[in-house]
Image (spheres, rainbow, N blue to C red):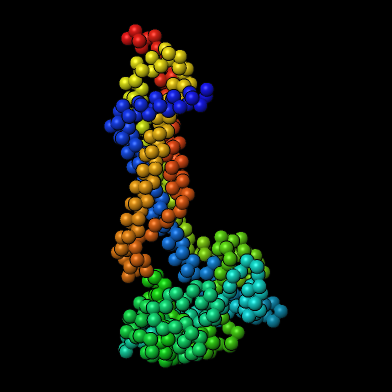
Amino acid sequence: MKASGTRLALRIALTHLLAKKKQTFVAMMGVTFGISMFIVMISFMQGINDFFMDLTLDGSPHIRIYNPAKIDRPPLLALRYDSTSNWLVVRHQRPKNEAIRLKKGVQMLDNIRKMPEVQQASPQLATQAFFHNGPIEFAGNVVGIDVKAENQMYKLYEKMESGSIDKLLTNREGIMIGERLAAKLNVVVGDRVSVTMPTGATFLLKVVGIFSFGISTIDDTRSYVQLQTAQKMLARPSDYFTDMHIRLKNYRTASALAPGLEHLYGYRAETWEVANASIEAGEMIRNVLTFVVSLTMLVVAGFGIYNIMNMTIVNKMRDIAILKATGFESREITNIFLLQSLIIGISGGLMGLAAGALISYGIDQIPFPARDIIKLDTFPINYRWYYYAAGLLFGAITTVLAGYFPSRKAAKVDPVAIIRG
């Protein structure tokens, strides 16, 4: 009996919808527009967020351990009286010449690599340098690396524009340079480049590879040499390095692991969140913007359905009165109009998902206009299935809520008053 009542309510709901095809179509288009724009907005914004997150994690470590330079700031002349020797000691403000190396770094590197949370750790010796193109000098960075470890962490082989990682591994006099820096120096693989270190020493190195991270600040200044080569260029011992880059199995655990490393080794442990705080803030702002705009679109679509359902009930007052006079209960009248809202919501939602997917695919094919700044072929789109499930669910909820209040109004109709006019 209950199933037959539901079927009858569904038939009446469909009859009402088909009797006013234009109104029904407009209501469905409102839901379709709201859901499609929700899909496009969230797919595009999350695509951008994922791209910048991948770009961030692709070019920076999850945790960086280093020894920050400490400069005390006493008064210009600090006086101290030594009563035992009857001397007046004068101390100048100039800081001590303190090395920023990681002491016992080799042992620390070995211990960190054995930690279960760590995927790989790589030592680095970074220094500023000048690259020469004839009489012109370009400022940049020379980074001494453990080539195998660095390749595992950042997949350098995928970023090579020309040349090979293996050539750097086997050539102590080799150097890999960023694509934009290579363009400024007008060099290609096989050429020699002159590099002057802060100590004043100049070295002639062979270009064995040209890489591109797709980040102009990196590609414009960075170069890689073997760690032993950097130590030789700076006249440092074989156990000397200034940084340790750590890549974790789960980058989200960096903020929990870093304080323990600081306490254990006494050096600064900087997480990727701290190093890229502006990118994290931008992602948060984009997420809030996406949520607000998407919610607004769904609410606007819901108000459109509410108005159409309200007008439908006003136009169907006499039919509602007849239904109630023939024995339909208030609950059954409510179900009829809720079914109408649900049909509009699901139909419009499915069309919205299809339209959103097509628009998203179209955006995904548009060439990115600033490829020389960021290495990106087309605009990034994220096609996660749960965005579509959420869009359909939100559309159904919005339309049911939009139809609930008019349906309650229909259920309270007095059939005698309506029939009498």
Q: Is residue 123 visible?
A: yes
Give the residue at x 63% y 74%: 113
Q: Nearer the viewer, residue 125 or 283?
A: 283
Give the residue at x 34% y 47%: 355
In the image, residue 217 lies at what x, y percent?
Answer: 39, 71
* Vertical placement of residue 402 versus 216, above or below: above
Q: Is residue 87 left or right of residue 281?
A: right
Q: Is residue 268 visible?
A: no
In the image, residue 412 lies at what x, y percent?
Answer: 43, 17
* Vertical placement of residue 319 versus 43, above or below: above
Q: Nearer the viewer, residue 27 or 279?
A: 27
Q: Residue furthest top?
A: 420
Q: Quadrant of the C terminus?
A: top left
Q: Is residue 151 left or right of residue 23?
A: right
In the image, residue 397 lies at what x, y percent?
Answer: 45, 36
Give the residue at x 32% y 32%: 24
Q: Nearer the viewer, residue 364 or 220?
A: 364
Q: How many numbered discs, if any?
A: 0
Asked which quadrant contains residue 406, the reply is: top left
In the image, residue 417 lies at what x, y percent?
Answer: 37, 9
Give the residue at x 41% y 38%: 346
Q: Residue furthest right?
A: 84
Q: Residue furthest left?
A: 22
Q: Nearer the viewer, residue 199 or 23?
A: 23
